[in-house]
Amino acid sequence: MPEPRRATYRNFRDAHGQLIDAGIVLWFPAPSSFTGENVAEFQGHGSPGALRAVLERCLSLGARLAHPGEFTERAYLNQRIDLAQAEAVADLIGAETIAAARAASRSLTGEFSGLVEAFCEELRTLRVLMEAAIDFPEEDIDVIAEYDVIRRIEETAVRLGEVVRAGRRGQLLREGLRVVLLGVPNVGKSSLLNRLAEADLAIVTDVAGTTRDLVQAQLSIEGVPISIVDTAGIRAGGDAIERLGMGRAVAAAGEADVGLVVVDAREDWRAAVSALREVVAVPERHIVVRNKIDIVGEAPAVHQEDGCTVIGVSALRGEGIDRVRSELLLAGGWDRQGGEGVFMARTRHLEALESARGYLERAARIEGSQADVMTEELGYAERALEAIVGRRVPDDLLGDIFSRFCIGK
Ligand SMILES: Nc1nc2c(ncn2[C@@H]2O[C@H](COP(=O)(O)OP(=O)(O)O)[C@@H](O)[C@H]2O)c(=O)[nH]1
Ligand SMILES: [Mg+2]
């Protein structure tokens, strides 16, 4: 046996003693391993043949292949990490930008879990106080007033709100934004895509109906992964291929989080947007981009009009493109003042945080500050938070979380 936790050079042999490969063996006796169980790690050369032979030898000696996420699941079940950290392992593996990877790392080290635990601790303290008040009413002190309970509940609710905001940023980093370019032919959608992607992805010509298929680009703005789709211009007529392209444009619009509606700066944008609406479902969250301002001699600018963000740009000259980038993030919900740290929050976490905050707000408003009703609300809030780190979670949720991992993680 190799010495624990020391890289040891060894030969790997098959059942007949034949050399398969030579490499490094690492031996992690329990409980000092990732899963908390005995773990041996073999590092060989990457050739598929040698790897398969080593694997087959291990299998014939009684090992079996791990299920997706099984290592992380065992680490969780053996209480090496909590559930939010386990999810962060998957998020780190799937991180598409460095900002997303950093956010996942913060969750993985337990920073997010630590915050959640601190909230639970505060709620427990308050509950113990109130239960004392219920059990010993004859003690004749007004616990709620004496210990400032209402103010503490309110403060906790406010701080929960801040964590939700930080979490929303993390969620955007994890899930990214889907953006669709919409507009009639020749307004400059493809030119704008190329500018945003800083590459010549889509063909630009002055022939209406140039773009027929969807052209997709992946970019990152302030670390938020953005997938942006250029579509065929929406117009009546066109040939069969162009009409198919329009069908795809309509479908892409339905899936997008944010729409970039491109119009010609010489036209009235309101009329252009309502004409477009007749044919395609423009995403609720959208920005109007008035392109070709070079022709009308305007400078790039952003303004709000009729509850809509309108940006003047010139895709030809590359003017105003940065404003499109930052308005896209705003429309997508990227909150620059979103609190200190960014955590890789999932929808599940945000819902739990929100519902805990709801219970607290209710508790603070209970008429006559009835201790028993307030205690109950505090208990609900605590349970919502506990589910984030994985205490009291139903088995099917666990199954769902770990089945999304890749094999071997
Ligand atoms: N003057 C001017 N022309 C532009 C601008 N953006 C695009 N164009 C031109 O408009 C035509 C159509 O552009 P394209 O990007 O193919 O439009 P799409 O059909 O909406 O994808 C091309 O000849 C472009 O060079 C702009 O900002 N200013
Ligand atoms: Mg085009």
Image (tube, helix red, strand yellow):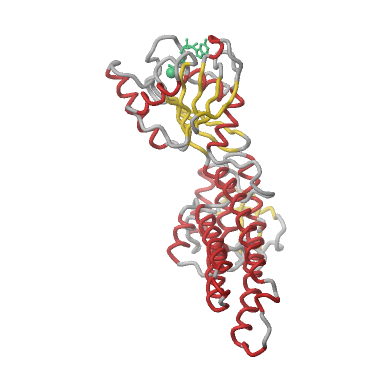
Q: Quadrant of the N terminus?
A: bottom right
Vertical placement of residue 126 versus 7, above or below? below
Along the line of sight, which residue is nearer the eye, 205 or 145?
145
Residue beneath the point at 36% across and 22% down: 234
Check the image and name the residue furthest to the bottom: 138
Q: What is the quadrant of residue 281 in the picture?
A: top left
Residue beneath the point at 70% across and 63% down: 4
Q: Position of residue 408 (x, y in %)?
A: 53, 53
Q: Quadrant of the C terminus?
A: bottom right
Along the line of sight, which residue is nearer the eye, 121 or 79?
121
**How many circles with numbers are drawn on the protein?**
0
Q: Position of residue 195 (x, y in %)?
A: 56, 21
Q: Position of residue 351 (x, y in %)?
A: 51, 57
Vertical placement of residue 43 versus 242, above or below? below
Vertical placement of residue 326 versus 402, above or below? above
Vertical placement of residue 144 versus 221, above or below? below
Q: Is residue 15 visible?
A: no
Q: Is residue 335 visible?
A: yes
Along the line of sight, which residue is nearer the eye, 100 or 27?
100
User: Left or right: where does residue 40 sit relative to residue 282?
Assistant: right
